Each structure stands twice: as C-alpha cells, then as structure tokens.
C-alpha cells in the first residue's frame, strides 16, 4: 500500500527532474552543433569596454620636415663682419627647425675647416624649447666649452689677413642632458655631442679678414 507522504515525495522528484531537463535543453540551444561555441551575444553584451592606458602618445615630426640650423647668412657665403674679430665679436643668431621626436636638448659646434677643424664655439644642453638663439647669448641652462683660444664661449672668426676660411656649424639633437659644466674642453664636448646625437645637421659660412 502506498502512503500519501510517499506519493508527495515522488512528485517532487519528478518536478526536479523535469526542471533539470529544461535547463539542459536551454543550454544546448545556445550552443553550436558541436556544443562548444556560444551563440551570438545580445545587444547589451555587444558593447565594447574602454580600457584606459598609461602609454604616452607618440610625438610625430611633421611630414617632409628635416632637422636643420639656419642663421643670418646665405649657405656657403660670407658672414657679416659684425660676428668676426673685425666687428663686434659676438655670436650670430641661429634657429633650429625640424627637431626630431625624442629630443631633450640641443647643441652646436662651430669649427674652422681651414685650420684643422679648430673649434670656435661649442654649446650643449640647450633646452629643446629654445630653438631660437639670440645673437651674443645662449639660453639659460646651456653650457659653453673652453676653446683653443683659452676662453669660454664664442671665439669670433679671425683668419689671417687676406685669407678666407670656411666655418662649419654643426647642430645636434640629443636625447638627454649631458653631464658637463661651463668651461669643459671644447673637443671633449664635441666628442660627447657626436656620440649622443639623435640627428645632426650642418651649415657653412665664410669668414675673412681684410
């Protein structure tokens, strides 16, 4: 004989079994025939999640630009007497342009190519924001070397009377601050600039003494 309590328990078992079957059929419906690939997400699930990044944006050099240095002279032509030993003996104004990405400081070296490359001016650690160099000065923070003349700073072109010399101005884009102070030997500073340069540019002018 079957008691009511036993009948009620059997019915609960049946209901539970049916529920499991229904859940199983729903899961199968959401899968592909091989049972591994889930069905397409719902519209609510199809939205992308933006993840913030700490990577700094890349600084791009404008297309077609190139690193160069220009001054108040025509390339390969004579510089104004104002900037020679027969004038005011002050450094000429200059301008850097096309500074490449990654540059931290700028530098420049003036050499006399007709005097075995003797250095007339060597400057480093020019802030990258100071691309315009005023005549007779250098930006704050820049360091100047001691030339073969024995003085710190600009040594005005002064070739022997009746001679014309070629002076090369080399510009440097540097990815760091160089560990030098005012008065460093000019050749030492030039060597350091050559070794650390990201990019180099040159311009030439003539100097003569009447």
Image: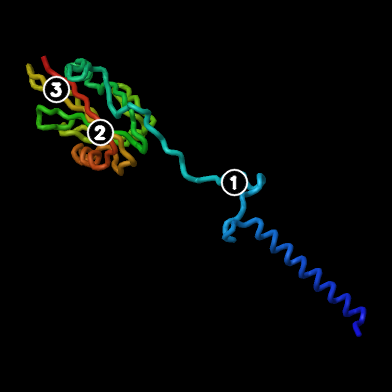
The answer to which of marks 3 and 2 sits earlier in the sequence is: 3
Q: Residues within 10 Å of mark 1 (few under 14, many from 20)?
A: few
**Which x, y percent locates residue 159?**
11, 22
Q: Which callout, 3 or 2, points to the residue nearer the camera?
A: 2
Q: Residue at x 31, y 24 (%)?
A: 95
- Residue at the image point whose x is 70% and y is 59% from the top: 26
Residue at x 34% of width, y 24% of height: 132
Quadrant location, the C terminus: top left
Residue 143 in view: no
Q: Are marks 3 and 2 in contact (CB under 8 Å)?
A: no
Q: Position of residue 135 (x, y in %)?
A: 30, 21
Q: CA distance from mark 3 to mark 1?
A: 68 Å
Mark 2 sits on what residue? Answer: 200
- First of labels 3, 1 by sequence position: 1
At x 37% / y 28%, what residue is drawn? 62
Q: Position of residue 70 (x, y in %)?
A: 27, 22
Q: State yes or no: discs 1 and 2 in contact (Cβ < 8 Å).
A: no
Q: Give how far apart the Cα atoms at labels 1 and 2 are.
A: 44 Å
Residue nearest the observer in this picture, 198 or 64: 64
Q: Nearer the viewer, mark 3 or mark 1?
A: 1
Q: Could you tell me if residue 101 is visible in this image?
A: yes
The secondary element bearing badge 2 is classed as strand
Q: Which residue is mark 3?
A: 158
Disc marking residue 67: none
Residue indicated by mark 1: 49
Quarter of the rendering occupied by the N terminus: bottom right
115, 105: nearer the viewer: 105
């Amino acid at each position: 004989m079957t008691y009511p309590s036993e009948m009620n328990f059997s019915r609960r078992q049946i209901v539970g079994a049916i529920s499991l079957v229904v859940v199983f059929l729903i899961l199968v419906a959401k899968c592909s025939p091989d049972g591994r690939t889930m069905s397409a997400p719902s519209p609510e699930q199809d939205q992308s999640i933006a993840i913030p990044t700490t990577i700094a944006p890349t600084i791009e050099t404008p297309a077609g630009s190139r690193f160069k240095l220009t001054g108040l002279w025509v390339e390969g032509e004579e510089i104004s007497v104002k900037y020679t030993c027969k004038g005011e003996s002050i450094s000429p104004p200059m301008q850097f342009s096309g500074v490449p990405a990654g540059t931290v400081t700028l530098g420049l070296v003036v050499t006399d190519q007709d005097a075995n490359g003797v250095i007339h001016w060597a400057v480093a650690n020019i802030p990258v924001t100071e691309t315009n160099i005023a005549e007779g000065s250098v930006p704050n923070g820049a360091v100047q070397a001691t030339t073969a003349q024995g003085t710190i700073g600009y040594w005005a072109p002064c070739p022997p009377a009746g001679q014309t010399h070629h002076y090369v101005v080399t510009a440097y884009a540097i990815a760091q601050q160089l560990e030098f102070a005012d008065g460093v030997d000019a050749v030492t500073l030039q060597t350091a600039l050559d070794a650390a340069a990201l990019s180099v540019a040159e311009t030439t002018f003539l100097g003569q003494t009447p």
